Amino acid sequence: MNTPHYHYLFGPVPSRRFGRSLGIDLTPRKTCSLDCVFCQLGRTTRKTLERKAYVPTADVIEEIEQWLKSGTSADYLTLSGSGEPTLHAQFGDVLAFLHRQPIPSVLLTNGTLFYLPEVRAAAAQAQVVKVSLSAWDQRSFEWVNRPQQQLDFATIFDGLREFRKGFDGQLWIEVFLLAGINAMPKDVKKIARLARALRPDRIHLNTTARPPAEDFAAAVPKARLEELTGLFEPPARIAADETAHRSPKTIADEASILAMLKRRPCTMNQIETAFGLHINEVSKILGHLIDTHQVRADLKRTEVYYTSTSIGSHSFQTQDK
Ligand code: SF4
C-alpha cells in the first residue's frame, strides 16, 4: 500500500535491523542535537536541545490509528525519521499509545537527551531502544558527532547508564565506524568498554553505505568490521544487508527511481519530491542501488547528484529546475 497521504508515517521500509518497519517521524528534517559526519540525511540544519511539540501529537496518533486499520503489516513501529525523536516533547505519549498495539515499538535515538529523567521515563515505554555510541570521550564525540555545544559526553553516558538500570526492554547499541576516524582497534576498544557497561542485548557495527554528510567519512571494509566484532560483549553483529527484507513496494519504487535516474541525474530532495516518498525511504533505496552498482553519487557544486551507472560520466549535466 502506498502511504504518501500520511504526513508523519513512512514505509513500512526494509530496515537492516528491524525487518519491515513503519517509520514515525516526529521532527522536521534534520532537527537534531547532533550533526554526525556520517549522517546519511546530510548536514543538520537545526542543531538544538529544545524539546517541544515539533509536530502535533494528536495528529500523529490519528495517522497511526488509520494505518493500523488499513490492514498493512509491519514487524515494528519505529520512532525514527529525519531528526532526533526525543526532541519531541511528547514522544512518550506516542510510545504509550504504541505500547497498547500488537506490534512492538522501537525508539531509534542518539541518546543525547537521556541525561534528563523525563526522557528516560518516556523512552522506557518502548520495547526496543536502540542508541548510538560512536565516540569514547568529549573530543571524539565532537569530532564524530559534532554535538550541540552544551552537550557533555560524560553526562550523556551517565544518563544512558541510569536508563539501563531502570529499563527491562531490549537495549541495542549501534556503533558507527569510519575509516581513519574512530575505527582503530585501540579506539574501538574504548567504545566497547563503554558499551559493555550498558549491558546491551545487541550491538551492531555500521559504516557508511550511502553518501554521508561529509566526504571524509569513509567506510570501513566489511572484513575489517568483522575483525572488530569480537572486541564487544556480546560480540557485535554487522548490520546485515537489507536486500532480504525488501518489499514489493520498495522494489517498485526502486524501479521507478532508477528509470528516472537513467534519464537525468537528481538530488535526494528531487527524488523525494517527485515520488512523494519520505527521505529515509529514498535514502535506503539509493543505498541499495549504489551497493548494487546501478547508481553512483557525484558531488557537483555543493550537492550530491545520483545518476544511473548506465549513463556515462561525460554526459553528466545538472538540470536544476
Ligand atoms: S545520524 Fe542521527 S543523530 Fe546523527 S545527525 Fe543524523 S539524524 Fe542526527
Image (cartoon, rainbow, N blue to C red):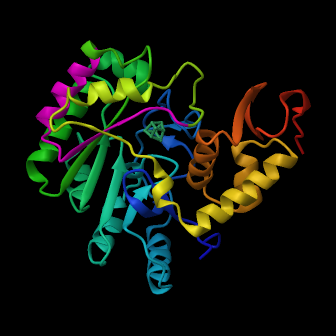
Question: Residue 128 appears in which quarter of the rendering?
Answer: bottom left
Residue 50 versus residue 190 in the image, above or below: below
Horizontal placement of 69 versus 192: left or right? right
Residue at the image position 47 percent from the left and 51 percent from the top: 242
Image coords of residue 259 (percent x, y): 80, 54
User: Camera-side residue: 100 or 239?
Assistant: 239
Horizontal placement of 172 versus 46: left or right? left
Residue at the image position 15 percent from the left and 38 percent from the top: 198
Horizontal placement of 32 versus 106: left or right? right
In which quadrant will I find the C terminus?
top right
Reply yes or no: does residue 206 show up in magenta: yes
Q: Is residue 152 visible?
A: no
Residue at the image position 87 percent from the left and 35 percent from the top: 318
Image coords of residue 181 (percent x, y): 42, 16
Residue 247 versus residue 108 in the image, above or below: below
Q: Is residue 89 visible?
A: yes
Q: Which residues are magenta?
A: 187-209
Image coords of residue 223 (percent x, y): 38, 26
Residue at the image position 16 percent from the left and 25 percent from the top: 193
Image coords of residue 50 (percent x, y): 42, 43
